[in-house]
Every structure is written in structure tokens, then in C-alpha cells.
Amino acid sequence: MQICNVCSEQTPKYRCPTCKIRYCSLACYKIHKDTCLPLTQPSRITVDKTVTLPAEPWNVEDLLDEDHYTDRVPLEILQRLGESQELRDLLHNPHLRQLLRSIDTADSKDDAMKAAMQEPLFVELSDQCLQIVENK
């Protein structure tokens, strides 16, 4: 049985997106984030002037590797996102693409997401994703 890497008391439910350690709660995350060190970054490949991709792309196991996560969305449902014409149409919008880039490159992802949620276009994207995932 695994234990939280921060408090060493509870079963971890989450994984740090930066360094991949496991933690059990928001309180442990807040303690951890001050000392978090990113894993070494893979080299990146520039496809064109607007898109930079990792040299080694992530795979499903990088995101979905714990059986006890209660909020996990099955792979079959996630694949629907890639098949959605509505999402593809939204992602052609240059403003939305820039907004997503700014979230991805932000030092504070929390603040960037809070700001993005004030943008109607981002809310539309989020709602569309939820409709697909929740099959509504």
C-alpha cells in the first residue's frame, strides 16, 4: 500500500504534474509545491513557428496509471474528445489557441486557469469537453 510522499500518513489520491510524486490532499499539495522540482524536460521539436512538441510524446500511461483514482475517465471516453468535430471547430479559433498556450506556459497554472474561466470561449470549450465525456 502506498502512502503520501508529503505527510506519510494517508493513501495518496493525486500525482504532482511537475515531479510525479504522490500526495493525498490539497494541504499536502500546498506544502509540496514550494519545494517541487520538475523532472528533466525532454528535448522539444518545433513543427512550425506556433507549435512546439515534445520529442518523446506522452502516452496514456503517463496520465492514467493508478487504479484507485476515483475521478478517472476511461480511455474509450477520452478518445471521443479526439473524434469530436465540435471540439476541432473550436480549436481552429486563434484566440482560443493562444489562450491554451498561455495556460500551458504559465508559471502559475492555477491563476492562468482562473483567468481562462472568465473567457466565454474557454468556458464553451470546457462545456463541450464535459458534454462529450459525460455523454450528454
Image: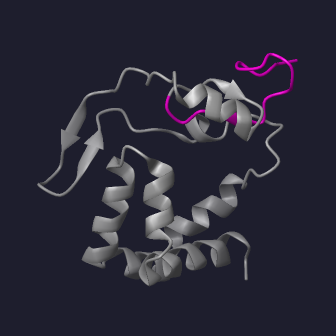
Colouring scheme applied when the structure was drawn: one colour
Residue 130 position (above or below residue 101): below
Above or below, comparing residue 63 to residue 92 in the picture: above
Q: Which residues are magenta?
A: 1-18
Residue 26 rendering spot, x and y as whole percentages: 71, 40
Picture residue at 20% right of the left edge, 39% below the top:
45
Nearest the eye: 75 or 73: 73
**Quarter-wise, where is residue 55 in the image?**
top left
User: Residue 33 sits in which quadrant?
Assistant: top right
Q: Could you tell me residue 22's position as x and y percent?
A: 69, 26
Q: Principal SS element in the magenta part?
A: loop
Q: The N terminus appears in which quarter of the rendering?
A: top right
Q: Position of residue 111 (x, y in %)?
A: 46, 55
Q: Which corner quadrant of the image does residue 127 belong to?
A: bottom right
Q: Residue at x 58, y 72 (%)?
A: 129
Q: Position of residue 29 (x, y in %)?
A: 65, 34
Was residue 54 drawn as part of the magenta stretch in this picture?
no
State whether residue 37 is above or below residue 136: above
Residue at the (86%, 25%) spot, across then down = 10
- In front here: 85 or 15? 15
Depth check: 108 or 133 in front? 108
Residue 29 higher or lower than 48, as above or below: above
Q: Is residue 75 left or right of residue 113?
A: right
